[in-house]
Amino acid sequence: MTATPLSVDGDRLWADILSTARIGAYGETGMNRLALSASDGEVRGWFEAECRALGCTVEVDAIGNMFAILPGTEPGLAAIAVGSHLDTQPAGGRFDGILGVLAGVEILRVLHASGERLRHPFTVINWTNEEGSRFSPAMMGSGVFCGVHDIETIYARADKEGVTVGEALEAIGYRGPHAPGHLPMAAYLELHIEQGPVLEADGSAVGVLSGVQGLRWLDVRIRGTEAHAGAFPMNLREDALVSAAKVVLATQAVALNHPPGVATVGYIHAGPNSRNVVPGEVRLEIDMRHPEEEGLAAMETKLTAEIGRLVPGAEVSVVWRKAPVAFDAALRGAIRQEAEGLSLSAIDMVSGAGHDAAHVAGKVPTAMIFIPSREGLSHNEREYSSPQQCADGANLLLRSVLRADQLS
Ligand SMILES: [Zn+2]
């Protein structure tokens, strides 16, 4: 490597962010670039052409994940990869996911301009359908790549119009020839906006992620007795919604008693949902998260017991259990050191949201970097990180890639 450390061009990165944001744009800053839509196809075409012009081959796998590969100097080594996703929510912004891919393109530009090469192949990945808003589940492409989902099952998933994943991939020309999981990786790094308010409130430039929180989804069904809201005396009622209110408060209390756990009742359906009828049945959906499996298990046990105590007869079922993910210690240490070298104030964080990196971490040494998002907003057209914040994140990503190249 050269004596002068390589550095990204923040203006060039910003120009890429603004110009590609026109693909699938609405209003001033809104983005509607759903996975496998025509605009997703268009931005994929841009990504492919740019990467080829920078000396890469571009490989596409059977679920449409794209891998832009710049050969390394030593044959036979697995790739050092960076990546994220170019799809957005239907009312999304210009940074969530996009930054991680475009920062990878910017690193390719830096390597191309300097003539430098890594020892390992350097790969920039665009994962298919991270957002999961048109087709579920979210993090689809990385999940298929890592063997979490079976591809035939995923091909059959349909959107609201009945179009399947397989058909949508064909329609935009991105059902590729490579088998899922084809690319050997020595390390995977993902740069992403925080999607929460912590870095901004803290005044830190970057977050170095120790992992991704584990998760439990609980469904609760409470039965009461429907009755006339005027004619039935209070002391004889079985009001399912009043019981549900106790569950909502118990959910909050369990999270508060297991810091840094969080728990939310995000969905509630009361039946028959009529002003003058005592509710006879309520369904609640609970989302609980904690960075440690022990804490998460304790929350599940405690909340289940509390619901049983407060609302005897309530049915509780756990519909999804996802263990916490821990990122690679050596890569995290390298990122911390590189942040210090760049004079970027860094804090350790756990991701509250899911990311492609969470899947990849099951297969490959993985780490993530966050930059601040203004007011913590994401999945929102007002989502914003400044040119300087994006450049800082991309520079740290570049330095971390160069370090990872020496680690293995
Ligand atoms: Zn994202």
Image (tube, grey):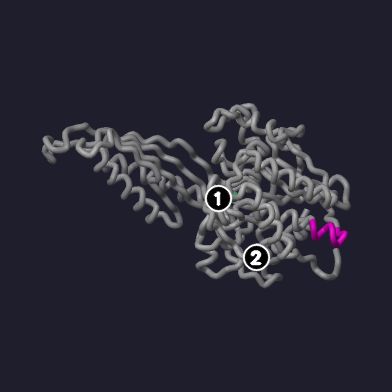
176 versus 336 height, above or below: above
107 versus 270 height, above or below: below
The residue at the point 82 percent across, 58 percent down is 111
Q: Amino acid at mark 1?
A: Gly
| Mark 1 Cα-neighbour bin, 10 Å: few <14, some 14–19, many ≥20 | many
The picture quadrant where one finds residue 87 is top right
The residue at the point 39 percent across, 42 percent down is 267
Q: Residue 225 at what x, y percent from top left?
A: 21, 32
The residue at the point 83 percent across, 50 percent down is 53
From the image, tell me which residue sits under label 1: 92
Q: Amino acid at mark 2?
A: Pro
Q: Residue 189 at what x, y percent from top left?
A: 69, 53
Left or right of residue 229, residue 353 in this image: right
Left or right of residue 74, residue 335 in this image: left
> Could you say whether the residue bearing mark 2 is in a helix, strand or loop?
helix
| Mark 2 Cα-neighbour bin, 10 Å: few <14, some 14–19, many ≥20 | some
Residue 364 falls within the magenta-colored stretch: no
**Residue in front for this viewpoint, 55 or 333:** 55
14 versus 63 height, above or below: below
